[in-house]
Amino acid sequence: MTNLSPTDLVGTLAALCSMASFVPQIAKIWREKDATSVSLRMYVVTVTGFMLWIGYGVLIESWPVAASNTVCLILSGAILGLKWRFREYHA
């Protein structure tokens, strides 16, 4: 097993926290079948930001940046999808 440098450890922990931060929101929306409290504009900006981070990671050839932001894009995109899916339940 490779020892992580302090820099890599901080980066790994930051990526894990960023990725995990979307899971409670997804679970809450799914459980309640309600996404009315989710800001559509905020998640559109968030998804756009993750797409730009992925592009940046590819351009600088940093797979950790590209990969972690890809996961965040998928999770934040899922929230947008759930916002769309449950829009009629609580209109």
Image (cartoon, rainbow, N blue to C red):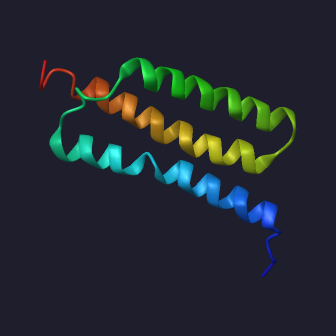
Q: What residue is rendered at 25% in x and 29% in y? A: 37
Q: Is residue 41 left or right of residue 3?
A: left
Farthest right residue in view: 60
Image quadrant holding the N terminus, namely bottom right
- Residue displayed at 74% across by 29% down: 55
Residue at the bottom extreme, as displayed: 1
Determine which quarter of the picture holds residue 48.
top right
Relative to residue 68, is residue 78 depicted above or below?
above
Q: Nearer the viewer, residue 16 or 61?
A: 16
Nearer to us in this view, 71 or 25:
25
Residue 77 position in % (x across, y down): 46, 32
Residue 65 lies in quadrant: top right
Identity of the residue drawn at 69% across and 26% down: 52
**Residue 68 in the image, given as x and y percentages of width and height:** 64, 48
Is 3 located above or below residue 52 in the figure?
Answer: below
Examine the rendered structure and indicate whether residue 27 appears above or below residue 52: below
Q: Is residue 76 left or right of residue 16?
A: left
**Residue in view at x 86 percent, y 41 percent:** 61
Q: Which residue sits furthest left?
A: 90
Image coordinates for residue 60, horizontal then vertical, percent = 87, 37
Image quadrant containing the C terminus = top left
Q: In which quarter of the image is residue 7?
A: bottom right
Pinpoint residue 82: horizontal percent, then vertical percent. Answer: 31, 32
